[in-house]
Image: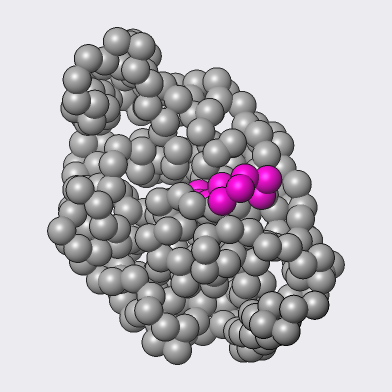
């Protein structure tokens, strides 16, 4: 082996090993048990960069309208940075405001906690970002013997910071994350993953029970169109009209034959009915600095989605919104 290449591999291996040593490993049998679909109603929190585009709004509404399956205890605003924000802090603040706006349109009080999250992205594993959201996640995770499902719809900064502050919470939570791309994809590059690469690595490396819902080639099937959302949501109360409005406003130009992916509803749909998904148990990949996946079959297990039933998911979402308005 080339000496420089061997040195590089050793450095990568040592850094991964050192990072993993701070976590108390969950035995494989227990981890596999935690990765099974949850029977009955679950405790959950939603971590969302709600104003990042328009898919989080659909997902937050979906979670709020599934009380028979989801005991929603908190919603956390996550940071983001794109053309709809001027900084991660601004993105988080706008997301917080959008959560409140959705609750108003629904005419609901919402869960007991609606909290602001990180004001930036992780720059160091030694300096997790304290926020109301991360601190609440730690407290809530350890408050019950029942696992807390963390439905993560954006950059996992809040979740990773909570894990770094108190690694013991990996024994008390299950993370369902919309992020990254499929393991057979040439690169892992995707908005949620790229926004905070260090936080994304924490999810893959910490041993936390993780269910990954990749964008391509899985949640990218969650396409809908202006005619469809108008047909099923227009006139369905303030929330239905609001979702139609933001959907139509998102596209600039001729909408002929245009469709939009509503990625984030996948995380909610998975816990409502895992039967709408095909998944595999795999060894957690190593996420490189180049945003590609590397593989080591000695690593812990995690679950990754490989396919979903688009029609069942959208059908369930539309019916819940319609029923909410009727009731």
Q: Which residue is depicted at the point 39% across and 87% down?
A: 127
Q: Which residue is depicted at the point 30% across and 68% down?
A: 117
Q: Which residue is depicted at the point 56% across and 82% down?
A: 167
- Quadrant for residue 308, please give it: top right
Q: Report if residue 323 lies within the magenta region.
A: no
Q: Vertical placement of 311 versus 211: above or below?
A: above
Q: Report if residue 184 lies within the magenta region.
A: yes
Q: In the rendering, at what x and y percent does residue 51 appear?
A: 25, 47
Magenta segment: 178-187
Q: In the rendering, at what x and y percent does residue 115 appear?
A: 29, 65
Answer yes or no: is residue 315 visible.
yes
Q: Vertical placement of 200 versus 322: above or below?
A: below
Q: Which residue is depicted at the point 43% across and 76% down?
A: 161
- Quadrant for residue 208, please give it: bottom right
Quarter of the N terminus within the rendering: bottom right
Q: Main secondary structure of the magenta part?
A: loop
> Would residue 102 appear left or right of 133 to someone viewing this image?
left
- Quadrant for residue 126, please give it: bottom left
**Number of callouts:** 0
Quarter of the C terminus within the rendering: top left
Q: In the rendering, at what x and y percent does residue 160 appear?
A: 47, 72
Q: In the rendering, at what x and y percent does residue 138 appear?
A: 47, 77
> Would residue 67 appear left or right of 236 to someone viewing this image?
right
Pick the front one: 288 or 33: 288
Q: Vertical placement of 318 versus 157: above or below?
A: above
Answer yes or no: is residue 136 visible.
no
């Amino acid at each position: 082996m080339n000496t420089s290449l061997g040195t590089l591999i050793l450095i990568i291996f040592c850094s991964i090993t050192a990072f993993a040593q701070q976590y108390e490993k969950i035995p494989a049998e227990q981890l596999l048990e935690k990765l099974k679909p949850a029977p009955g109603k679950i405790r959950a929190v939603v971590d969302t960069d709600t104003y990042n585009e328009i898919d989080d709004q659909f997902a937050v509404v979906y979670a709020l309208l599934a009380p028979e399956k989801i005991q929603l205890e908190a919603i956390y605003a996550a940071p983001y940075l794109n053309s709809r924000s001027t900084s991660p802090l601004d993105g988080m603040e706008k997301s917080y405001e959008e959560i409140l706006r959705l609750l108003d349109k629904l005419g609901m009080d919402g869960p007991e906690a609606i909290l602001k999250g990180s004001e930036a992205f992780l720059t160091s594993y030694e300096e997790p970002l304290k926020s109301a959201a991360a601190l609440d996640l730690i407290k809530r995770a350890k408050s019950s013997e029942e696992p807390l499902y963390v439905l993560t719809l954006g950059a996992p900064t809040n979740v990773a910071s909570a894990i770094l502050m108190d690694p013991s919470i990996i024994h008390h939570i299950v993370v369902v994350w919309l992020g990254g791309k499929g393991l057979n994809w040439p690169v892992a590059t995707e908005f949620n993953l790229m926004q905070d690469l260090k936080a994304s690595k924490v999810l893959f490396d910490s041993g936390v029970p993780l269910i990954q819902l990749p964008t391509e080639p899985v949640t990218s099937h969650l396409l809908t169109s202006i005619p469809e959302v108008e047909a099923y949501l227009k006139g369905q109360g303030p929330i239905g009209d609001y979702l139609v409005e933001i959907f139509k406003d998102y596209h600039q130009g001729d909408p002929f034959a245009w469709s939009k992916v509503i990625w984030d509803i996948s995380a909610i749909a998975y816990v409502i009915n895992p039967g709408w998904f095909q998944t595999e148990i795999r060894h957690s990949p190593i996420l490189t600095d180049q945003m590609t996946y590397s593989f080591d079959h000695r690593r812990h297990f995690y679950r990754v989605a490989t396919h979903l039933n688009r029609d069942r998911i959208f059908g369930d979402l539309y019916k819940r919104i319609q029923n909410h308005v009727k009731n």
